[in-house]
Amino acid sequence: MSVGASGPAGPPDGPRDRREAELRERAAAFVDEVLVPLEVPAELAGGPLPAADVERIRTTSLAARVHGGRHAVAHGGNGWTTREWFLVEEQLGRSTNGVSWYVPNAYNVWKAAGPALVERWLVPALRGELHDAYAVTEADAGSDPSQMTTTARRAGPGRWVLDGEKWFVTFGSVAAVVVVMAWAVDGADGGADGPDGERRPTLFAVPADAPGVEVVDDPPFTHAYPHGHPTMRFTGVELTDADVIGAVGEGEEIQRRWFTEERLAIAARCSGAMQRLLEEGVAWAAGRVQGGARLLDHQGVSFPLADSAADAAAGRLLAFDVADRVDAGADEKLVHGRASMAKLFCSEAANRCADRVLQVFGGRGYVRTTAAERLWRELRVDRIWEGTSEVQRMIVARSLERRGVRAMLL
């Protein structure tokens, strides 16, 4: 059985080590045997795969138990620790073309949802029967939630009316439910649970087929992924208190936890991508002869690979440390800052690694059937989504001041 580019960290010496090694090997085998063979067909098709391939990914991922992330076993997930979840995300990061997006999963915000919402949306999502989407970005409020204009206004006891437009809604083109961040605004008609006119950040579970929900633009992007990131408009969408995730006004707190996990996931996947890039780059350079010597024997090739190895090792340790802190119950705001640091470093490092390895492959590196070329394109967005590198730097700088240098570094 293949263990992928990362391989076991060392001989297992305890129950946790054996469990993690088995999980990593299982996830690596799934990636190598199921996902990687579908990358080039997906690329040549412009992203989407045939229904038969999609179903195979769904069924084999469920059988291999590499789906569902940290969601509870009772809901259809695997109940992983953050560290275990990181190991699987890292392996999924070794694949390209978003083929892993077909693996059943759901956003972590459902942990704050009530039983009815969990049963309606989360449970079938973890069976691969539907997909959720998350809508937070707006045209003029990309990284500044305070500038958000989407509102959900009270329309009577227990009722809301949602209006707004969200950009870059990942999975929005296929989602059955859209998690929408909006200002909950209490009206003057009674039934309000706060002062009239008060704006409170709140998450709503919005059925994608509800009247007033529409996709107004579905632009093409640099990567060839199976699902789009469309612009979605919500016009007079009628909702109820039962559609609120968590409680009214808790949206910012729930979203902070979402951002922390999403940024750590990006760091994990970038770690896996760097491992694959190095594995393929070193193998090519060791087997390719130019000027009477292997490419690997030329410093112009070997030194960039060595720099990339240092980037990959440092980023992995940094991100793993964040995962361990989550499992240890560390302060959420400190973890939030450190997750931003991990996302910043790993996304920037992965881009450097992809550029270097593509260069190692020369002309072949510029061919889309080469993994290095696909990763070179795909990794670029990791410096943008879930908060740009510049936003991460702002978060890290504020954390240095508020949490302290020692807390952020040690």
Image: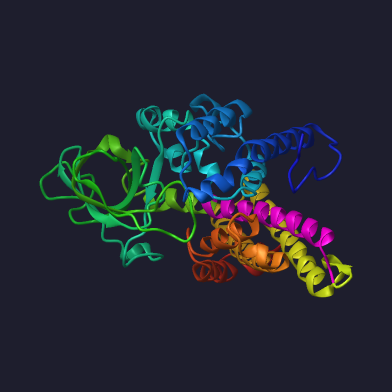
Along the horizontal axis of the image, is 28 left or right of 63?
Answer: right
Q: Quadrant of residue 160?
A: top left
Q: Quadrant of the C terminus?
A: bottom right
Residue that sits furthest to the left in the current view: 189
Along the horizontal axis of the image, is 91 left or right of 193?
Answer: right
Along the horizontal axis of the image, is 368 left or right of 17?
Answer: left
Q: Residue at x 85, y 43 (%)?
A: 10
Of residue 368 and residue 31, the one placed in the foreground of this image is 368
Of residue 199 and residue 298, the one placed in the foreground of this image is 298
Of residue 275 and residue 47, the one placed in the foreground of this image is 47
Q: Quadrant of residue 70?
A: top right
**Looking at the image, can residue 247 be seen?**
yes
Residue 347 in picture, x, y percent from top left: 60, 62
Residue 155 in picture, x, y percent from top left: 14, 44
The magenta stretch spans residue 264? yes
Residue 311 in picture, x, y percent from top left: 72, 64
Q: Is residue 169 above or below residue 37?
A: below
Write down the region rendered in magenta: 261-290
The mark tally for this picture is 0
Q: Residue at x 80, y 42 (%)?
A: 8
The magenta stretch spans residue 212? no
